[in-house]
Image: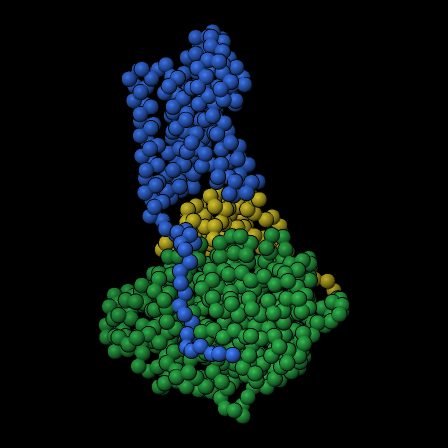
Chain colours: A blue, B yellow, C green
Amino acid sequence: MSSTTLWYATRATGLVAMVLLSATTVLGIVTANRVTSRRWPGFALQDLHRRVSLLSVVFLAGHVLTSVLDTYVHIGWAAVVVPFASSYRRGWVAAGTVSLDLLLAVAVTSLLRHRLPARLWRGVHWLAYLSWPVAMAHGMAMGTDVRLGWVLDLCLACIAAVVGATAWRTALAAGRTRRARLLLPVRRRPEGVPVKHLTG
Amino acid sequence: MAPTVRGTGEVTVKVNPVACEAYGYCAELLPELVTLDEWGYPVVDGRPVPDRLVDLAVAAARRCPRRALLVETAPPPSPRRR
Amino acid sequence: MSPTSSTVAVPPPASPDATPAAGTLFGAWWSSGRSDLAAHVAHFGPLPVPRRVDDQWCDRFAAAVASSGLTGRGGAAFPSARKLALVRAGRAGGLLVVNASEGEPASAKDAALVSCAPHLVLDGAELTALAVRAERVVVCVADDRPDTALAVTYAVAERAGTGLSPVPVDIRRPPGRFVTGEESALVSWLDGGPAAPSFRPRRGTLLTVGRRPVLVHNAETLAHVALIARAGAAAFRRTGPAEAPGTLLTTITGAVERPGVYEVAMGTPLGEVLGRAAPRQAVAAVLTGGFGGSWVPGTALATPYAPGDLARIGGVVGAGVLVVLPRSSCGVAETARIAAFMAGESAGQCGPCVFGLPAVAADLAALAEGRPDAALGARLSGRLGAVDGRGACRHPDGVVRMVRSALSVFADDVRAHLRGAPCPGLRRPSVLPPARPR
């Protein structure tokens, strides 16, 4: 496979992965917001979130594979999971690596979900909120196609979608004060029977 | 860690009210057994789960994002001895 | 020097001739007016702990508790012997928790007991701890009861080094919330978590702190255990009916001249019990059991104060709480106030409780103020059914029971309120135990 083909493949799979990962994130937020309708019940959206995330991982794997196999620039296998191990554009590749590491943690814990404590799964899953922006930064900084109008528009659309969904989630969560009670300081109880002091 | 218990006795469905956060997937998947109250929380009546719905109940329990749906199997009644 | 007692009144017995017998909980306090160790030992005798605590002694102790028929005095009335047996069957080295957290606003009996007879409670705790091979006693007093905590701290200090505390005693101050006193909430807090009840789908599961089993008993229950260990199960059974023997502490408040904590024999007619506190006017109704208990009508005062008899008229003994409602007050309004308080005391864990109780309270407030909408009756009824039994603990169940009993006992008032004609009692100040502003 020629270097050019690999390079095109890297860019293409990267772009598709970016869109799919953004969609995954938006779907995750949508399920957290308890969106449900007759045609799209909650469990179906949850299912869609899982399937789109698996698809993203497939394209991401292609992206990583082609970028390492392409010998035009040296990235090396180590750089796939170890940040700053690449000699080519160390910083931005590292961003991709970090994003991938976080995503792998989310993916692995999700696949093993029922064998792990619930709190561990939830804690790791929140890392997705970190993985996505780092991936976007990696894509927009490294992607040679960003100078194309439509690619830039696509990136901005992805960002708008995730940021918008996050803002919506934050607004909804603020309205849910259910757990707030347990965190409030202890409130004073009624006196009971305060009548008179007795001396011994 | 799996949310179900397998056995050969009567199967019932229960909700852990502390874990439940009103996602509502259980009511979507098992409308025959689970309804939602006016605040979106599941109501189960403790009736035994019909055989044809047991697999669906187990699937619904796995889907619950908070693992609040529990599928329990009562131990089979001990055989009578003369 | 014994400490001055707390802010609770423990009024003297009805007449000088009716001095309670030596076996009653406040015996030492009545005869000497003191609650210190010397007075306690002088009145009750030494702690009946053997030189060697072996299985034989533990078995005899457990048997005595079982044959006494003692049930928990914390409200749930669970047979104490059964709880003991459950924890005995587990591993050693657990905790014995003395539950004096008393989150019920209308109850002051544990505070009175711990202030006026702390050594009886501690005796019971030590003996029970030995019987279940616990390695520590933990006394829980709410963090907004400084006087009670002081009294028990003093008592524990008195016992230290005397051989009367074979099992070391710690004092912990859990938050003063209503649900804190629930067994699993208290244990959760002791284990470092929030003071919120846990979901216990299977009855009879052991509570644990770390990996150690925990036996939680109400302070009064342990005081009775101390008496049973000294005088025997038969002496305990001499008072009260066969199915509910012994005495219990009641807290009588509301429209009475002498509110306070009274020790009564189980089975005493309700009217006689209330009579000791001298109701100020004709009794319209009595709230029994606590804020999560139930109302009984003023016409039923001949009923014996015992679990079975009270249940027949829709009442509940619970934690020995009795709040007297006079004719001049509005039962619906008081019910609405209680419901609002209870809604605010939800642990905040379970949807039906968190959302359902405030909704019920709002409906009751509208009813009390005489501004109901046409659908209120049906809606309230439906909500009560939706909330009942759907929490992790019995808090919502108690509120539902209390409200349903109010709808029944105050049926005429409810009908008037539904017509939009509230009674003048609405404007009267509440007779409920006073609440500090939040």
The x and y percentages for residue C265 are: 54, 83
In the displayed orientation, state which residue is furthest to the front. C1
Does residue A146 appear left or right of residue B21 in this picture? left
Please report the residue visible at 44 percent of the width from the left and 15 percent of the height from the top: A89
Q: Is residue C428 left or right of residue C80?
A: left
Residue B68: % across, % down: 49, 49
Q: Nearer the viewer, residue C271 or A62?
A: C271
Instruction: Check the picture and name the quadrant holding the C terminus of chain C.
Output: bottom left
State the residue at coordinates (40%, 60%). Answer: A187
Q: Which quadrant does the N terminus of chain C fall into?
A: bottom right
Q: Which of the pair B7/A11 is nearer the observer? A: A11
Q: In which quarter of the image is residue A47?
A: top left
Residue at (41%, 65%) from the top-left corner?
A: A189
Residue C156 showing in the rendered view: yes
Q: In this view of the protein, can residue A62 be seen by the observer?
A: no
The image quadrant of residue A59 is top left
Total labels: the figure holds 0
Q: Farthest bottom residue? A: C17
* Residue located at (50% from left, 27% from top): A101
Query: Could you tell me residue A170's position as x and y percent?
Result: 34, 41
Viewer-side residue, C426 vs C226: C226
Q: Where is residue A180 drawn, in percent x and y?
A: 39, 51
Depicted A145 relative to depicted C268: above or below: above
Query: Does C337 appear above or below A106?
Result: below
